[in-house]
Amino acid sequence: MSHTCGPPFSPLQLGRISGAFDAIGVFELKTAIKGFRVRRAAAVAVTAGAVLATGALTAAPAQAVTTPTITAKGGYVMNSATGKTLFTKAADTKRLTASTTKVMTAKVVLSQPNLNLDTKVTIKKAVSDYMVAKGYPSSAHLIVGDKVTVRQLLYGMLLPSGCDAAFALADKFGSGTTPSARTKNFIGKMNTMAKSLGMTNTHFDSFDGLSNGSNYSTPRDLTKVARSVMKSTAFKTVVKTKAYTAKTVTSSGSTRTMSTWTNTNTLLGWNGTLGIKTGSGPDAHYCLVFAATLNGKSVVGAVMTAPSEADRTSDVKKLINYGYAKIG
């Protein structure tokens, strides 16, 4: 038998042998013959060397992430942690926002100084009159005379998309001597907030998305307000809630248990989806502002003018998965 690293040994030369693996996996044989050493490569070292020689341990090239095709006319996705753009499709084209408008309504409410979410608001007849005038749009079914907290109004506006709750909030936090003046002033605050957030292609003419002809935004701009307001713990708690039952105080002082408000966002809980707000209308078609976090990756975005509710859902699922993949 011969060895590649030294001459053959006789039985006498191998009379006393000791050995150990050194730091790189090579087995070192020591004989009783003074000053004579031999190093033999252990099988594990040979194997490792062969693998390295063939490049089998080198990192595999990163798989290219295929950009999804969406049915919505506009879409945008951002890494919510860094603000980096991950996906765009007509991201700066102005489109009707429908009830995604209520994300800004909530942002303005939550930005009020010294806000107490447990402050009670009495539902005025003006709320009912508004709902009648608008042809009974989406509603939280608030009852005139009831006292409802600001927190409950946020649930009523953001889960069942109650336009009555949006009116009550705008009336509460706007300035003026009449409901009309106060809600108009509140809309002004929405536009001021939009400017402060860099929403350069956005204008609101309503607090609930029932446009008077000049209520528009873009996927990129809606994502900006979404990223900002999702920093509010109160907002995050509301929009991730699938169902909520409010207990209000009636005009006689008794407790009223409202019918449960169900979130219109059916994506909640899917693959880390945390919210945020749906929107739909005959002209706006189907919109969704969304946020999701999974395995330390967070995305926020919007789709606008999808042809159907099912298409909107499919689009957002594609974009959330794509966003995660792009973050890596």
Image: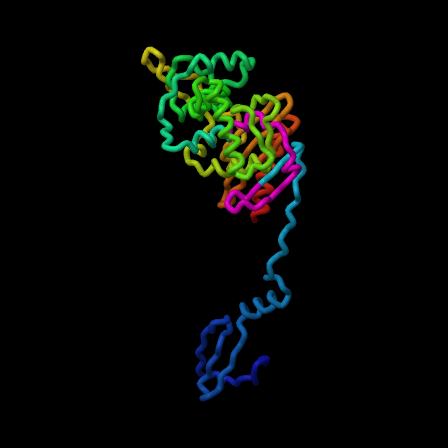
- Name the residue rendered at 63%, 32% in the picture: 94
Magenta segment boundaries in residue numbering: 78-103
Q: Is residue 203 left or right of residue 105?
A: right
- Name the residue rendered at 44%, 78% in the picture: 18
Which residue is at the front of the view, 73 or 16? 73
Q: Is residue 82 magenta?
A: yes
Residue 214 in view of the camera: yes
Across and down, in percent, residue 251 comes to 35, 12
Which residue is at the front of the view, 190 or 161? 190
**Residue 56, image quadrant:** bottom right
* Residue furthest out toward the front: 177
Q: Is residue 132 above or below residue 175?
A: above
Marker count (numbered): 0
Q: Is residue 203 left or right of residue 28?
A: right
Q: Is residue 297 above or below residue 306?
A: below
Residue 244 in view of the camera: no
- Name the residue rendered at 46%, 23% in the picture: 170
Across and down, in percent, residue 223 comes to 55, 37
Q: Is residue 318 above or below residue 148?
A: below
Q: Quadrant of the N terminus?
A: bottom right
Which residue is at the front of the view, 72 or 144? 144
* Residue furthest out toward the left: 253
Q: Is residue 87 magenta?
A: yes
- The image's colouring method is rainbow
* Residue furthest out toward the bottom: 34
Across and down, in percent, residue 191 comes to 53, 31
- Name the residue rendered at 57%, 70% in the picture: 46
Across and down, in percent, residue 175 comes to 44, 24
